[in-house]
């Protein structure tokens, strides 16, 4: 059997594939964070909680309202996104003129409240969400058995990431957004409703997290703490990519998934720390991140 | 041996009383029995003990009548957040300021080891119900605690031996990379090799891990018949779920969960867990006596109790009986009385407390039912065999505990 660094090629390829899938998750989550930070300058610590709420909306929607997976894929981001807009409108806007630190503390507090209330009701063991019927089973790729659902996650996440990048960087709406955050007074003078634009953007960023939550529901136990575990890693990804860089977030997300995947083969003990090592290196060599612009 | 044990116990008691001249031995201090309940109330291990364990403790006190010889029983509780520091500081505060007589609960092994040191320094009593590490009554034993429900030794001895006996002689170990995982892994390795099996390969994964797909893929590539999970709580749940997604069992391999709690099986569902072999200290549906207690518990809590929650009730009862019989809440007086009394209740069969503080009792090998065989949502296990108390735990002849002089 051909070997790569002492590991059979088949195993190596399988690990790359899994790394890519995890990377797609990181990309989707860090994309939402990057959009919110890049356009609104809010360090959204509630992002993990929104991801978790997306998964819970999916689970509870099925249990109490009979809403299936495909409908949840659309509805859960809408509901959670709407919640995000309420938060922006009622809370974040009031501290918009203050230092970033206040936004960070506020969103962190919100995350703790959401998490704590759900722990009280549901406990922490988490509940199972069944894999949708159309995506059960798996594909025999030759080098590995790939569950169909994971292949779907990869495709869905990539499509949404690219779509978001396209809207923000290549369309008129995106141009308004970028201009509105660069110079809100000027945009308002042109007759653009900037506060509304900001509310919608925050809602959209949060909806992306909720979308990732729906994708995660059949993969991991749906539990109130699922978001906080992931959030720190995602923040590291955003820092490596460069705060606010959209393409940077997506590419770094995928890249970190791959690096983590390979670590799991060669030195599994370090799998949880490797991303932070990369972060330290990047901060030392390029403080603005791989894709960030020097301030 | 008993002579040495008693002289040791009494010398510690004398030392303690001479330090605190005001404490008379055959009396209940401050006219109250104070019990502190320490557990993970909000994190990974919440559902196996947590608030449900506190409820079991309170149930025991109510059933006992709420007081001992007119001295009321007070309960306080705290969340240790799975941190040894938080746990030890909480208990120090309880002892210094609140005069707590007994610390109950105790889940994460690292927290327990830190807390039992504090208990030993202050000569107070602790009953450990949630922890797994067998080292708690081995190299970390103290004359101030008792380990009640289970530990890693019978887990390995029960599950691994049964699996090897059924022909599962090649193992791939997936181990949580911290003290508890390492202890369990080495206990399993010993059992597997002693019974003629081999460990093909092992992976130590970080604690906690969300995504097990990579490790499961490596386990599939190893060709081992059995994939042994030396982890607990959410890690085990995630590993089993991922194995099911990747068709590990359909591929001809079998999983052996070495520490699986009732709430884990309930959370994963029978579709995913059916056929899983596990060792448990107690199961709510194992006989009439257990069922009767479990149903009372269910009415209060809305969930069936885990072995840890049942053990908290059982150990609290045994403690309160000892306080009543001796008329004292002095740690050594109560502990020696508890050791003299056999333990036979809805939870423990053939139970007794050894000099190392280990409460040995019958353990059970169980198999998770298939969805077709299960009659309702909590009908989860089939008990396959009973492991007799005296065989289940690490024999005293192999003990490194300072209280055992062989």
Image: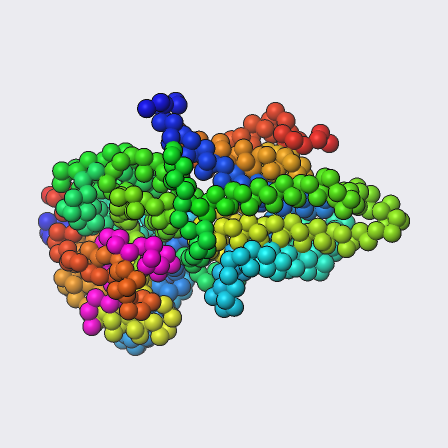
Residue B224: name its quadrant: top left
Q: Is residue A24 visible?
A: yes
Relative to B76, residue B261 above or below: above
- In x, y percent, where is residue B117? 32, 48
Residue at the outermost right position: A189
Residue B144 vs residue A189, the one in the foreground: A189
Q: How many labels does the image show?
A: 0
Left or right of residue B283: residue A17:
right
Report the quarter where the N terminus of chain A lies: top left
Q: Does the magenta stretch include residue B284?
A: yes
Q: Residue at x 89, y 49 (%)?
A: A189
- Magenta highlight range: B264-288
Residue A163 vs residue A291, the one in the foreground: A163
- In x, y percent, where is residue B295? 30, 73
Left or right of residue A77: residue B65:
left
Q: Which residue is drawn at 65% across and 43% down?
A: A163
Q: Residue at x 78, y 44 (%)?
A: A172
Residue B268: name its quadrant: bottom left
- In x, y percent, where is residue A247? 65, 36
Report the quarter where the C terminus of chain A lies: top right
Q: Can residue B7 be seen in this view?
A: no
Relative to A294, residue B236 above or below: below
Colouring scheme applied when the structure was drawn: rainbow
Q: Does the magenta stretch include residue A150?
A: no
Relative to B277, residue B33 above or below: below
- In x, y percent, where is residue A229? 49, 47
């Amino acid at each position: 059997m051909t070997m790569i660094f002492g590991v059979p090629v088949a195993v190596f390829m399988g690990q790359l594939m899994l790394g890519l899938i995890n990377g797609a998750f990181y990309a989707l989550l860090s994309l939402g964070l990057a959009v919110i930070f890049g356009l609104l300058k809010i360090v959204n610590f509630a992002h993990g909680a929104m991801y978790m709420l997306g998964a819970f909306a999916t689970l509870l929607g099925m249990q109490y309202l009979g809403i299936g997976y495909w409908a949840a894929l659309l509805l859960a981001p809408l509901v959670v996104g709407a919640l995000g807009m309420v938060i922006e409108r009622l809370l974040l806007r009031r501290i918009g003129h203050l230092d970033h630190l206040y936004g960070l503390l506020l969103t962190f507090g919100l995350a703790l409240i959401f998490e704590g209330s759900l722990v009280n009701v549901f406990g922490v063991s988490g509940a199972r969400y069944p894999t949708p019927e159309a995506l059960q089973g798996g594909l025999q790729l030759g080098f590995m058995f790939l569950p169909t659902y994971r292949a779907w996650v990869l495709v869905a996440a990539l499509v949404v990431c690219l779509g978001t990048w396209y809207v923000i960087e290549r369309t008129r709406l995106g141009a308004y957004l970028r201009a509105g955050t660069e110079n809100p007074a000027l945009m308002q003078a042109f007759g653009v409703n900037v506060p509304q634009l900001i509310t919608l953007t925050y809602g959209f960023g949060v909806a992306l997290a909720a979308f990732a939550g729906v994708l995660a529901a059949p993969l991991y136990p749906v539990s109130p703490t699922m978001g906080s575990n992931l959030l720190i890693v995602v923040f590291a990804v955003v820092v490596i990519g460069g705060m606010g860089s959209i393409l940077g977030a997506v590419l770094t997300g995928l890249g970190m998934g791959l690096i983590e995947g390979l670590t799991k083969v060669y030195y599994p003990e370090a799998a949880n720390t490797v991303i932070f090592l990369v972060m330290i290196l990047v901060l030392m060599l390029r403080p603005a991140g791989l894709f960030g612009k020097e301030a | 041996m008993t002579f040495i044990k008693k002289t040791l116990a009494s010398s510690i008691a004398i030392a303690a009383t001479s330090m605190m001249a005001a404490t008379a031995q055959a009396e209940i201090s401050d006219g109250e029995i104070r019990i502190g309940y320490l557990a993970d109330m909000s994190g990974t291990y919440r559902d196996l003990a947590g608030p449900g364990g506190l409820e079991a403790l309170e149930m025991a006190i109510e059933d006992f009548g709420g007081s001992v010889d007119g001295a009321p029983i007070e309960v306080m509780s705290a969340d240790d957040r799975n941190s040894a520091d938080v746990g030890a500081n909480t208990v120090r505060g309880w002892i210094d300021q609140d005069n707590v007589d007994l610390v109950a609960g105790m889940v994460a092994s690292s927290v327990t080891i830190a807390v039992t040191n504090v208990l030993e320094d202050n000569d107070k009593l602790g009953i450990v119900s949630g922890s797994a590490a067998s080292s708690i009554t081995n190299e970390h034993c103290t004359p101030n605690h008792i380990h009640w429900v289970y530990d890693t030794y019978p887990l390995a001895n029960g599950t691994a031996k049964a699996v090897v006996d059924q022909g599962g002689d090649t193992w791939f170990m997936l181990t949580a990379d911290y003290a508890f995982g390492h202890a369990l892994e080495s206990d399993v390795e010993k059992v597997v090799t002693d019974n003629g099996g081999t460990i093909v390969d092992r992976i130590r994964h970080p604690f906690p891990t969300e995504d097990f797909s990579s490790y499961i893929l490596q386990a599939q590539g190893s060709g081992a018949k059995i994939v042994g999970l030396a982890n607990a709580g959410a890690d085990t749940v995630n590993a089993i779920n991922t194995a099911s997604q990747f068709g590990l069992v359909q591929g001809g391999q079998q999983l052996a969960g070495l520490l699986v709690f009732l709430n884990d099986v309930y959370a994963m569902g029978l579709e995913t867990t059916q056929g899983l072999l596990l060792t448990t200290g107690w199961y709510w549906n194992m006989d009439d006596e257990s069922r009767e207690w479990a149903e009372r518990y269910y009415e209060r809590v809305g969930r069936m109790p885990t072995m840890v929650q049942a053990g908290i009730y059982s150990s609290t009862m045994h403690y309160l009986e000892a306080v009543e019989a001796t008329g004292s809440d002095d740690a050594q007086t109560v502990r020696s009385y508890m050791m003299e009394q056999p333990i036979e209740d809805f939870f423990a069969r053939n139970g007794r407390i050894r000099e190392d503080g280990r409460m040995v009792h019958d353990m059970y090998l169980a198999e998770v039912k298939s969805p077709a065989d299960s009659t309702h949502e909590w009908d989860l296990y089939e008990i396959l065999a009973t492991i007799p108390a005296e065989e289940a735990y690490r024999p005293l002849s192999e003990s490194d505990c300072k209280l055992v002089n062989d």
